[in-house]
Structure formats: C-alpha cells, structure tokens
C-alpha cells in the first residue's frame, strides 16, 4: 500500500521582479486536508478523522481547519499495514 502513496515532489515557481525561483514541496512537508488524505489512501474523510482522533498521526490546524502531514499519514499506513499483516 505504501507504493500507492508515493508521488513525485511538486515544483512551484514564483516571480519576483523579473526573477524566477523554484520551490520544491517534498511529501514530508506537504499538508493535506482530511479529504485529500482520504483520496490519497483510498478511504473516506471520516475514516481519516477517526484515525486522527485515535492518535494514529498528529493533526495541525491552519485557520481552525485540520491538516495532516503526508509523511505522518504514510508512516501511520505502513504501521497499520504491518500490524494487520501479523494478526492474520
């Protein structure tokens, strides 16, 4: 499942008085809404919210809205997959 979560880093360009700078947004720094995280994992936003409430990963609030770091989500999925694999 972790292979499904991998995406290439995004590159944004900004223009500052005739110069152009590239900023690389790595997955470890990327903040996702619960809806975006759910789409990435392939579950519902409610599932992501329940996982956050259980403490599977930390939640950051921006302007009162919850966000989860993509790297934290990946680690939680890897731990969950490993534990579920052992129980069976």
Image: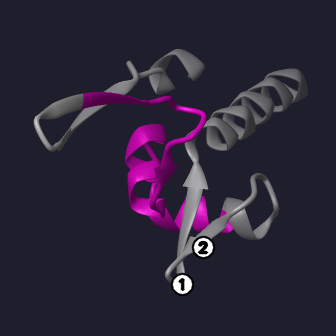
Is residue 47 toward the left or the right of residue 57 in the image?
Answer: left
Which residue, as the protein is rendered here, is positioned at the far front?
Answer: 17
CB atoms of marks 2 and 1 within 8 Å: yes
Q: Residue at x 59, y 55 (%)?
A: 68
The C terminus is located in which quarter? top right
* Secondary element at image label 2: strand
Residue 77 numbered tag: none
Q: Is residue 27 above or below residue 41?
A: above
Q: CA distance from mark 2 to mark 1?
A: 5 Å
Tell me where residue 85 sits by quadrant.
Answer: top right
Q: Residue at x 47, y 21 (%)?
A: 6
**Badge count:** 2
Asked if residue 49 lies in the magenta stretch, the reply is yes
Q: Residues within 10 Å of mark 2 (few under 14, many from 20)?
A: few
Which residue, as the protein is rendered here, is positioned at the far bottom?
Answer: 64
Q: State the image coordinates of residue 47 (x, y, percent, origin top left).
A: 57, 61
Q: Residue at x 38, y 18 (%)?
A: 8
User: Circle 1 is placed at which residue position?
Assistant: 64
* Extent of the magenta region: 21-50
Asked if residue 4 lies in the magenta stretch, the reply is no
Is residue 65 toward the left or the right of residue 74 in the image?
Answer: left
Q: State the image coordinates of residue 58 (x, y, percent, origin top left).
A: 75, 58
* Secondary element at image label 1: loop
Q: State the image coordinates of residue 39 (x, y, percent, origin top left).
A: 37, 46
Tell me where residue 49 sits by quadrant.
Answer: bottom right
Describe the colour scheme in one phrase: one colour
Q: State the image coordinates of residue 1 (x, y, percent, origin top left).
A: 56, 22
Q: Residue at x 58, y 21 (%)?
A: 2
Q: Is residue 16 above or below residue 60?
A: above
Q: Residues within 10 Å of mark 1 (few under 14, many from 20)?
A: few
Residue 61 numbered tag: 2
């Amino acid at each position: 499942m972790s292979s499904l979560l991998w995406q290439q880093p995004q590159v944004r360009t900004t223009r500052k008085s005739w110069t152009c700078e590239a900023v690389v947004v790595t997955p470890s720094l990327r903040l996702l809404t619960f809806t975006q995280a759910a789409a990435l994992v392939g579950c519902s936003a409610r599932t992501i919210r329940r996982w956050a409430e259980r403490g599977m990963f930390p939640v950051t609030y921006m302007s009162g809205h919850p966000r989860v770091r993509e790297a934290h989500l990946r680690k939680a999925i890897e731990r969950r997959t490993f534990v579920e694999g052992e129980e069976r």
